[in-house]
Every structure is written in C-alpha cells, then in structure tokens.
C-alpha cells in the first residue's frame, strides 16, 4: 500500500485505497454482520490501509457503530471520514437532514457519539440539498474546524463550478478551505474527466471516488446473474445499457482471460496505473461486503498493467467530453499543428513514459 497527501494543499496523509463501510451493518437489504465487518477491517488494516470512509446514513447509523469498536484504542492510526446530509434511521426530520448549519451541527454530534471519538479527520457534505446556500455549508464546516471537531471539510457529488467558486470565496474570507471532492468514477463512468478532475488538479483538491466497479458491472457478474446491488439496493450502479458499456465489459473479460486475473482486480489496477500517468491522483473507495471481495481489490496492489492492456481499457472507456472541451481540443490541434502530440506543459514532463 502506498501513501500520499489528500491533494496538494494539505498534509493529511491517506492510503492509496480508502475502505468504504456502507456494507458494515445489516440494517439495509445487503451488508456484513459485525464479525464479517471486523474481518474486512482487519484485512484492510493488515494490508496497510489507513483511510476509512463512512456516513451517518450507512446502514442507518450501524456502520459508524461498528467502526467505533474497530477503532477503539487505535483511533489515531487511521484517517477517518464521515458524511452528513441524509440523516440516520429515526432521525430524518425536516431539521435533521440537508446541509444547513443546524443540520451539520446535529449530524456531527450524533456521528461522534456513534463513532465514540471526539473528532473527524474529514467531514463531507454527502450531496447538495438544492436548498441550503453553499456558503452556509462552507461556513459551518469552517466553524467546526476552528472548534476542533473536524480537521477538514469536503464536498461530495457537488459540481465543479460550486467547489471552485467556494474555494475562491473561502480564500477571500479567510475560511478553512474545502480540501476534497468525491464522486463516482470508474472505467464505466469517466464523466469526472470533463470538469471535476481538471478542477481538482488546478486547485490542489484531493479526489476520492466511489463505485470503482460501477456497482458490480465491471466484475462481469451481471452477465450471468442479477444478484448484487442490481436486485438489492438498486442504486449507485452502472447498467450495461449502451454499446460502449458492453464493449468495456467485453474488454475487461478478455484481458482477464488473457492474464488469469479477475475483472474486478483489473478495473482497480487500471485506476492505479491511471494515477501513475496523471497529475491528478484519485483515491478509490473500495466497499467490500465479504473478505473475498476485499482480496480481489487488494490484489490490484500486486498487478501491473502492461502498456497494451492499459491502452485497450483506456481507449474503450474514453468519455465524450462535449462542448466546450471538444472545441478546445480542436483548437489545440490547429494551434500546434502536427506537433501537438509532442507538446506537454512543464508540470507534465515528469509523468511522460
């Protein structure tokens, strides 16, 4: 396991994988009991993992409760992140959900009690609520940093323009900056390359990505059975509903057969190799329900994609960036002529292969 700072504007150290704990608990239609959750946690920690991601809504709060026992006595070894917005079970009233100052204060105190800790390393707004002004959310997170309740704040599922605008305003008003963005990203969903990843690179913001297997699509399991998120949660899942997604799964399965490697492992290995070739590193949040699933994720630490396999996956999954990005690429080609492929910005040179 390798380690890095979460973005370039903070010294917060994280492991290259984060352990997502939405499956820690049995309150939802799917999940892991306390004993299995403990085994998964121990396996992740033994592999060198230190970044733990949870939320008050996961398993109606049971995820945080399980983590309290697992973190007891060794809390400072781990970088612990939780989220607010949706509330926990029995606590989803009009004043206990959303991203208002009142909600954030209530949600944090509740999470700290469940986690049995007095601070969080990172506290995320889980999603925009489309009601609360973002400035209010940012100011509330700044207050919590100054109070010592959290060390940093982040925005999950927010558009790039809101994050960048508030980064500028926070700097102008002397507020603690937002240090991270979180969104879905995988071979099956590379939409973040339009604006979120370039924004993070320019602002030095850390990137955590969820659903790195497209909710199970990239394992190939839905080719033979609907068992999984498709039939349980029916959420946060990519479906094989386009020619490109079919081609992506086909290519993964083909490379898996050629290399004797599980498709899930290859999908995560592509993310690691992408990090080696990019100026913007992403931290995959892996959310196993079993120790076998976690083993497949962790095996990616030992897999080096060769240039051919990486390029095949890169090509088949390439996103359509759309306007204005396509126009900008055309302009680049015209301005630089036939030399555009040999031109790099100064800060890219060290990443050339």
Image (tube, rainbow, N blue to C red):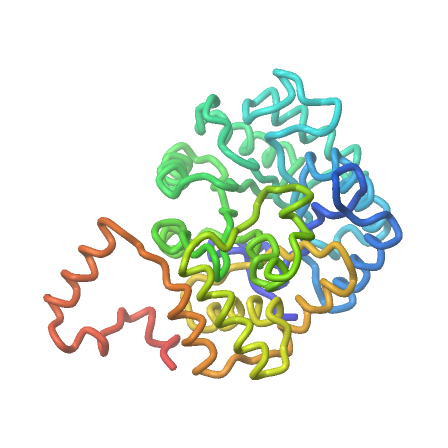
Horizontal side of residue 352 vs 100, given as left or right: left
Q: Quadrant of residue 286?
A: bottom right
Q: Quadrant of residue 333?
A: bottom left
Residue at x-position 51% and y-position 65%: 249
Q: Quadrant of residue 221?
A: bottom right
Residue at x-position 37% and y-position 34%: 169
Residue closer to the observer: 146 or 282: 282
Residue at the extreme top of the image, as rendered: 94
Q: How many marks?
A: 0
Residue closer to the observer: 324 or 228: 228
Residue at x-position 34% and y-position 52%: 194
Residue closer to the observer: 44 or 306: 306
State the image coordinates of residue 228 (x, y, percent, origin top left).
68, 51
For the N terminus, the quadrant is: bottom right
Horizontal side of residue 107 vs 45, given as left or right: left
State the image coordinates of residue 25 (x, y, percent, origin top left).
80, 43
Residue at x-position 71% and y-position 56%: 288
Residue at the extreme right of the image, as rendered: 35
Residue closer to the observer: 290 or 122: 290
State the image coordinates of residue 262 (x, y, percent, origin top left).
64, 73
127 lies above or below 256: above
Horizontal side of residue 121 vs 273, given as left or right: right
State the image coordinates of residue 18 (x, y, percent, origin top left).
64, 57
For the C terminus, the quadrant is: bottom left
Q: Is residue 69 visible?
A: yes
Q: Is residue 180 visible?
A: no
């Amino acid at each position: 396991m390798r380690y890095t700072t979460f973005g370039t504007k903070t010294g917060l150290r994280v492991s290259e994988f984060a352990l997502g704990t939405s499956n820690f608990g049995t309150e939802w239609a799917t999940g892991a009991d306390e004993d299995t959750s403990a085994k998964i946690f121990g396996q992740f920690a033994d592999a060198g993992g230190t970044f733990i991601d949870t939320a008050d809504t996961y398993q109606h709060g049971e995820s945080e409760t399980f983590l309290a026992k697992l973190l007891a006595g060794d809390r400072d070894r781990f970088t612990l992140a939780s989220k607010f917005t949706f509330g926990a079970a029995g606590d989803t009233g009009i004043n206990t959900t959303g991203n208002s100052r009142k909600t954030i204060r209530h949600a944090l105190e509740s999470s700290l009690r469940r986690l049995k800790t007095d601070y969080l390393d990172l506290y995320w707004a889980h999603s925009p609520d489309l009601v609360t002004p973002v400035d209010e959310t940012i100011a509330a997170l700044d207050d919590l940093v100054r109070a010592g309740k959290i060390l940093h704040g982040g925005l999950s599922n927010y558009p790039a323009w809101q994050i960048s605008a508030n980064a500028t305003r926070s700097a102008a008003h002397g507020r603690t900056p937002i240090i991270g963005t979180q969104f879905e990203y995988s071979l099956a969903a590379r939409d973040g390359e339009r604006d979120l990843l370039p924004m993070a690179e320019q602002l030095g913001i850390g990137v955590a990505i969820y659903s790195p297997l497209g909710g199970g699509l990239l394992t190939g399991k839905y080719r033979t059975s609907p068992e999984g998120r498709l039939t349980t949660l029916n959420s946060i899942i990519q479906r094989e509903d386009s020619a490109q997604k079919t081609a992506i799964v086909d290519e993964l399965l083909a490379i898996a057969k050629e290399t004797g490697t599980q498709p899930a492992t290859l999908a995560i290995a592509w993310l690691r190799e992408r990090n080696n070739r990019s100026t913007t590193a992403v931290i995959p949040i892996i959310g196993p329900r079993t120790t076998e699933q976690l083993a497949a994720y962790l095996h990616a630490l030992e897999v080096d994609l060769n240039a051919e396999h990486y390029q095949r996956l890169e090509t088949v999954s390439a996103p359509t960036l759309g306007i204005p990005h396509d126009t900008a690429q055309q302009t680049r080609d015209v301005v630089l002529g036939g030399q555009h492929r040999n031109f790099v910005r100064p800060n890219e040179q060290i990443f050339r292969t």
